Amino acid sequence: MSTMRVPCPAPPGHTAIRALASPRNELEVDFRTGDVVNLTTGKRLSIAPLAGAALEILEAGGEANWLRAHASQGGGAHDPTGEKQS
């Protein structure tokens, strides 16, 4: 298991997450399934899972990494005719 701290906007269910945790509690969040576990108290909660680009950005380690990965895969700028630009 890896730990990653990523600042992000409040996810759906954030009010319930705040009620689940107290300062210095350690939480484990599975953004694919929406499972939240307070590792300090053992309490559990389910929230809406992330999907699409939001999940891809999180898994890439942030927006900058996601953009770099997509640019290196040919996801660069396009002109109106659909031709890729270098």
Image (tube, rainbow, N blue to C red):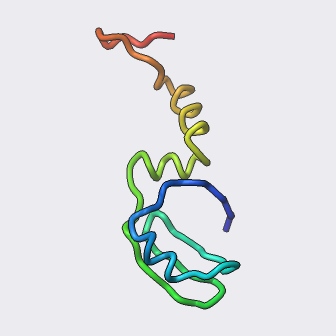
Q: Position of residue 23 (x, y in %)?
A: 66, 78
Left or right? Give the position of 78 relative to 63. left
Quadrant placement of the N terminus: bottom right
Using the image as rendered, state which of residue 49 and residue 10 is in the foreground. Answer: 10
Left or right? Give the position of 49 relative to 81. right
Q: Position of residue 31 (x, y in %)?
A: 48, 64
Q: Position of residue 15 (x, y in %)?
A: 44, 73
Using the image as rendered, state which of residue 1 and residue 5 is in the foreground. Answer: 5
Using the image as rendered, state which of residue 13 and residue 66 is in the foreground. Answer: 13
Using the image as rendered, state which of residue 24 and residue 6 is in the foreground. Answer: 24
Residue sitting at x 46%, y 53%: 55
How many numbered discs? Answer: 0
Q: Is residue 5 above or below residue 30?
A: above
Q: Position of residue 40 (x, y in %)?
A: 66, 86
Q: Is residue 80 above or below residue 27?
A: above
Q: Is residue 25 above or below residue 59?
A: below
Residue sitting at x 42%, y 45%: 53
Residue 4, image quadrant: bottom right
Left or right? Give the position of 65 relative to 57. right
Residue sitting at x 54%, y 51%: 58
Residue sitting at x 59%, y 54%: 7
Residue lying farthest left? 81
Q: Is residue 38 above or below residue 10?
A: below
